[in-house]
Amino acid sequence: MGARDGGRTPDAADRLALALTGSPDARLLFLGNFEVEQQWALGEHTLPRLSAATSSAVVNRMDEFALLLAGGRDHVVLKTRPDGDYLGYLAGLGLDLPHVHVPAAQDPQRTVTEDALADPALLAELAGLAADGCRIAAHGVSEPEERLAAATGLRLAGPDAATCKAVNSKVYSRRIADELGLRQPRGWACETLAELADAFAAVDAELGDGRAVVKEAFGVSGKGIARLTSRRRGERILGLIAKQVEASGRPRIAMVVEEWVAKSTDLNYQFTVGLDGSVAFDFVKEQLTEDGVHKGHRMPARLGADQVDELRTAADLLGKRLASDGFHGVVGVDAMVDPDGGIYPVVEINARNNMSTYQVRLQERFVKPEQVAVARHYPLRLTAPLAFDELRRLLDGLLLDPAGGTGLLVNNFATVNAAFTGGDAPVDGRLYGIVLADSAEELTTIDAEIADRLDRRERGDRP
């Protein structure tokens, strides 16, 4: 395989271009349309919302992750232009950054794709890339990304929205894992109210209260999931869904009911399905979660060779099946380790970019084989916007140096100030980064010092 600048060793950006388009030299236009599941879920029956939703303003600014997935000859659409000092910091690390395009205005409640569709001048600008063969590489493809392709003449680098929705359903994930004989928690894929009622009855008879969960087919980030804590709760959920079905006239549902099993570790592994149906295993990382919500990744995963081999085998089986169903591109799979060290190789399939996808190019460039690293975010409570230059001074001595080594590599700054809308009330933000260290102990020390300095700033203390 060639490299996109003709001389260097192919990197993650080259491999992604090859899988999506058949050529490592293809130019891509990246879109970080996070939580694309919300588009796939339109028209689907849902569980009652039992918890507050995460701020859409912050989630939509996760689009800036795409800046570091692209290479220098690529393009990216972002909701706003990145902080100039942040761009300078990235350039100082030696990163080859893509061409950035931004809409004339952004709505915090819209995805980056929707912002682009609302700007005729930007659409015309992007249309100019089509003649050069540039193609759209989205976080995941849904109806708005198809409309953007039609409006600009840019082809999609990957399958269409219908295919992407089909293979990202938890019902699909559950059924193909069963067909392939891959171990997963006991469960039931339900597409009718009768099937859901039968699954709830089986839970009552065989598992008991609190031993199962029900999930929407396109739930994400801890949303669209409910614990079956009692028979009465199951009956209430079934009744609410039945009312939706009756009101809509659409009898089909898409839900999964699964046993709540004991685990010691959450995992996320990624593989890439090529246009030719080939399957390449990319990596496995430990997934850090809290109440079912993703919090970060630890790399490398603390697994034995036989455990990794089991995941590689699962990836090959899943990848070939996805290819036969018309999918190619990045696939992330959530998995688990049970308390005895056994592997559940499939919890759910995410046939789209995953959080770990946006780390791999940086991991290959900066994390040495003997090092450990954690990709995570630091929650912030801000009374005024925080400029990157101020953050750099605040974390002096803790940010990764251009020469490499240890420290924090910031891989998304837009989410820090995304929730500010002009009011006086404090807002919540997130600082995303990858912490590199030479040992687990050093990693803990650096991570704690970063959190402490951010906390002291929040309290108004001097560092």
Image (cartoon, rainbow, N blue to C red):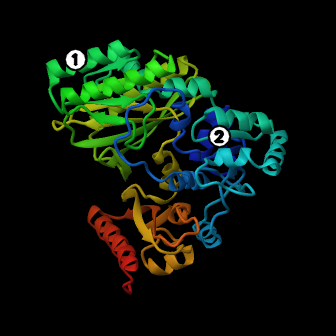
Q: Which residue is mark 1?
A: 201
Q: Quadrant of the N terminus?
A: top right
Q: Quadrant of the C terminus?
A: bottom left
- At 16% across and 36% down in the image, what residue appears? 340
62 displayed left or right of 201: right
Name which residue type carries label 2.
Ala
- At 54% across and 21% down in the image, what residue appears? 323
421 displayed left or right of 426: right
Comparing labels 2 and 1, the label whose residue is closer to the camera: 1
132 displayed left or right of 263: right
Residue 63 or 356: which is nearer the viewer? Answer: 63
Spatial CA span between label 2 and label 1 = 43 Å
Q: Position of residue 291 (x, y in %)?
A: 29, 47
Q: Secondary structure at mark 2?
A: strand
- At 39% across and 40% down in the image, what residue appears? 223
- At 22% across and 17% down in the image, what residue appears? 201
Residue 228 or 379: which is nearer the viewer? Answer: 228
Residue 56 or 152: which is nearer the viewer? Answer: 56
* Residue 189, quarter of picture: top left
Q: How many marks?
A: 2
* Residue 160, quarter of picture: top right
77 displayed left or right of 354: right
Q: Is residue 74 above or below residue 181?
A: below
Q: Position of residue 5 (x, y in %)?
A: 71, 50
Q: Position of residue 317 (x, y in %)?
A: 42, 22
Q: Which residue is mark 2?
A: 137
Q: Position of residue 230 (x, y in %)?
A: 18, 30
Q: Mark 2 vs mark 1: which is more N-terminal? A: 2
Q: Is residue 415 above or below residue 141?
A: below
Q: Is residue 51 above or below residue 91?
A: above
